[in-house]
Amino acid sequence: MKQKRNEIDKLKLLFVVPQLHGGGAERKVLEIINSLDYNKFEVDIVVWQRGRMYEKLRKGVNLYSYNYRNHKHNFAYFYEFLKIILKGFFLFRKYDLIISWIELFPTYLSFISAFLRHKKIIGVIHIVLSDWIKIMNAYKGHWFLIPKIYNKLDRVICVSNAVKEDLIKNFKINPSKIKVIYNPVNIEYINSLKKEEPVDFKFDENKDYILGIGRIDQQKGFDILIKAFEILCNVNERVELIILGRGKDEEILKEYTKKVNIADKVHFCGFKENPFSFLYRSTIFVSSSRVEGLSSVLLEAMACGIPIIGTDIPATREILENGEYGIIVPVNSPEKLAKAMKRLLEDKELQDKFRKAGYKRLLDFNKDRIVKEYEQLFIEVYKD
């Protein structure tokens, strides 16, 4: 039987995150953790691997690590997963609520630990899972595990309505368990950083720059962006392409740019602690993703006043409201993307329209309001 909580007691929260390497979901969990009301909550975080972003955690937040190691063999993976479950079992005992911030295996394992400890657990989903499983040719067992595990969680947070609809339609998740909370945008933080000089890159005022940001893999569609840029270069000699991020397809794409003789115009700049300085100085931002849950960088581009082109996937349509706040192009169509980039580069009035509209759209992603939604949900789940 649950012991009645004293009014002045703080709710003890533990966030479970695989790593803090600087991806969009990882930056958002730091924003949430650092912005919660610490008169109401005590907050700690456990990671599978530490990563570079841990220094940005608010003072007083304890950071634990499972010291997870990647392996090539299934038995070694099983051993690592068993260790995570056992470590979670012992760690979870002192917390009121567990928040598994990343979908699939991190949530599966956290659920087992929480179940054994009789602890309440919330899962957060940042991706349209059915599309992601197909496009990334992911583990087929997810089709079985997602409905089995997620229907047993105390609550499921989806970062967009697109993610919610996919869960209900394709995985039969109970709608009453699902709450949609958008990713927050910290405009003040972005404004404080966007005018800093970009690291290891010099912008030329006489050129136009198209910018893409994200993990360089099949999901993010940089292969399509580069092919579209190749087409664009045939009619525009002053445009260049910048890609921020790392990933397994990086070398393949670099070789392709050499093969088609555009390597001198495509800049692979790697991961940047401050992507906002690039967003602020670029001409157009392009999201070429094949699947997203809710693109944080799309919103951050709006905050930096850069016009946007995005692919026609549910989460991007939700942000851009079917073209009201940016141009939407078909997925996997370099020709249509090239045409849209050419149009937007040449139409200054359209650029200004999207810049102004973007600031208006950001009101729906206000950080303070969204943090309050999280706080209310944490208290509600604990009391249920």
Image (spheres, helix red, strand yellow):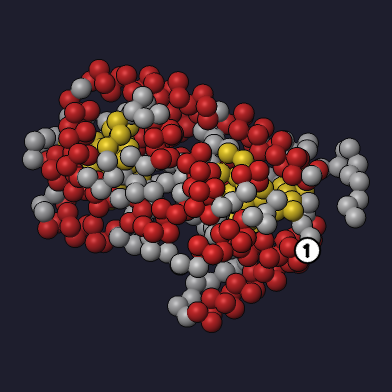
At x 10%, y 52%, the residue is 261
Callout 1 crowding tier (Cα within 10 Å): few <14, some 14–19, many ≥20: some
At x 53%, y 30%, the residue is 365
Q: Which residue is mark 1?
A: 117
- Left or right? Give the position of 360 relative to 278: right
Q: Report if residue 127 is visible in the image.
A: no
Please state which of residues 230 and 326 is positioned toward the viewer in this rendering. 326
State which quadrant residue 307 falls in: top left
- Left or right? Give the position of 252 relative to 98: left
Please state which of residues 103 and 150 is positioned toward the viewer in this rendering. 150
Check disc 1 and give the amino acid type.
Arg
Q: Position of residue 41 (x, y in %)?
A: 76, 42
State which quadrant residue 83 falls in: bottom right
Viewport quadrant of the C terminus: top right
Q: Position of residue 383 (x, y in %)?
A: 81, 43
Q: Position of residue 60 (x, y in %)?
A: 71, 47
State which quadrant residue 343 falls in: top left
Q: Report if residue 219 is visible in the image.
A: yes
At x 60%, y 72%, the residue is 81
Q: Farthest residue toward the left?
A: 234
Q: Position of residue 194 (x, y in %)?
A: 41, 32
Q: Is residue 382 above or below residue 346?
A: below
At x 50%, y 48%, the residue is 169
